[in-house]
């Protein structure tokens, strides 16, 4: 029995096509493995915090804390005061920051 897969195609070209097919399959398998690893890594990553400090929100929005206070005063963002021990911290909802990043209006 012959090893001819493609009738009428010279053996040298058939070998070249076989090698190309094997390389294509290997590359596709590597890409699939990389995508699976990225999905697993994303699933294991902790969720983003629900609330952010003024500094954290300012870093995400790429503005100064002073600009962030201005956005609070204009009503573009809402904040909550959280008492911890003897001091109070201003916290901003992550959803509000994400909304501003998307460009949505309040």
Image: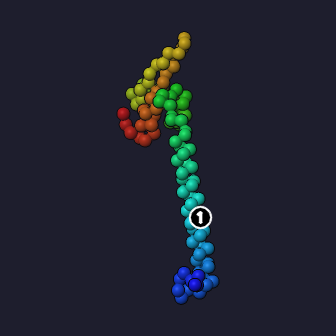
Residue 78's image quarter? top left
Question: Residue 38 at what x, y percent from top left?
Answer: 55, 48
Q: Is residue 40 visible?
A: yes
Q: Residue furthest left?
A: 106
Colouring rule applied to residues: rainbow
Give the residue drawn at x 44%, y 24%: 79
Compared to residue 47, the image places residue 92 above or below, namely above
The residue identified by callout 1 is 26
| SS of the residue under disc 1 | helix
* Farthest residue, direction bottom: 8
The residue lying toward the viewer, choosing from 31 and 67, is: 31
Tell me where residue 69 appears, x and y as whole percent: 48, 26
Number of disc labels: 1
Q: Residue at x 54, y 11 (%)?
A: 86
The residue positioned 54% from the left and 51% from the top of the image is 36
Residue 87: x %, y % from top left: 54, 14
**Residue 19 x, y percent position in the rendering:** 61, 73
Q: Quadrant of the N terminus?
A: bottom right
Q: Residue at x 44, y 21 (%)?
A: 80
Front residue of 54/71: it is: 54
- Is residue 59 positioned above or below 13 on the image? above
**Label 1 environment density (alpha carbons within 10 Å; few <14, some 14–19, many ≥20):** few
* The C terminus - image quarter: top left
Q: Is residue 63 visible?
A: no
Residue that lies at the very extreme toward the front in this rendered image: 1
Looking at the image, residue 101 lies above or below residue 89: below
Compare residues 86 and 60 and report the one nearer the observer: 86
Q: Is residue 94 above or below residue 41?
A: above
């Amino acid at each position: 029995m012959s090893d001819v897969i493609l009738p009428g195609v010279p053996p040298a070209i058939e070998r070249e096509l076989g090698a190309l097919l094997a390389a294509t399959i290997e590359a596709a398998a590597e890409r699939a493995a990389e995508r699976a690893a990225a999905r697993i890594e994303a699933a294991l990553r902790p969720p983003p915090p629900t609330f952010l400090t003024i500094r954290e929100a300012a870093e995400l929005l790429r503005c100064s804390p002073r600009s962030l206070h201005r956005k609070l005063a204009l009503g573009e963002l809402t904040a909550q005061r959280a008492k911890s021990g003897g001091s109070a911290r201003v916290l901003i909802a992550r959803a509000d920051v994400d909304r501003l990043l998307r460009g949505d209006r309040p």
